[in-house]
Amino acid sequence: MRRVLITGMSGTGKSGVIAELAALGYKAVDENQAKFHSQFDHIILLSAPMEVLTQRLAARTNNPFGKSALEFRRFQADVQEVEPLLRGIADREIDATLPLSQVVRAILDAVGAQPLA
């Protein structure tokens, strides 16, 4: 069994990707809801331009992070400081502005996952 970490800044669509993978039959857990594991076979970074992430933060209803001015400033700093670190450890970077189905397909292709029956 392969273990894949899907990472990225707030608003990149990680939760949506996890939900779609689970719907396709893959064992997928959201790290916000599960114990963090340190051993991975692949690390995939979802990325998007700051303006896209800002729009997504403002529009989302499933997570309040980034709505307050203080949190938004923290988010902006994280994009500048943390995202380059994630990029440095990622095996692959995927454009999170693509439609969800294409993001999921790119992840599956990147890790060599076979379609589930």
Image (spheres, rainbow, N blue to C red):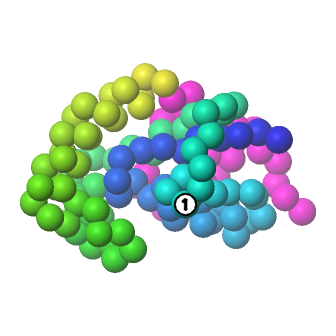
Q: Quadrant of the C terminus?
A: bottom right
Q: Is residue 98 above or below residue 82?
A: below
Left or right: residue 36 versus residue 63 is right
* Residue 100 seen by the camera: no
* 36 in the magenta segment: no
Towards the viewer: 60 or 111? 60
Residue 99 forms part of the magenta stretch? yes
Amino acid carrying label 1: it is Gln
SS of the residue at dot 1?
A: loop
User: Does residue 76 lie above or below 39 as drawn?
Assistant: below
Task: Please report the residue visible at 22 percent of the width from the left and 34 percent of the height from the top.
Answer: 80
Q: Residue under label 1, please give it.
A: 33
Q: Position of residue 99 (x, y in %)?
A: 49, 61
The range drawn in magenta is: 90-117
As drawn, which residue projects farthest toward the bottom?
61
The picture places residue 61, in percent across and down from the top left corner, at 34, 77
Picture coordinates of residue 6 (x, y %)?
A: 55, 45
Q: Which corner quadrant of the image does residue 60 belong to?
A: bottom left
10 Å crowding of disc 1: few (<14), some (14-19), many (20+): few
Task: Specify the quadrant of the image occupied by residue 101.
Answer: bottom right
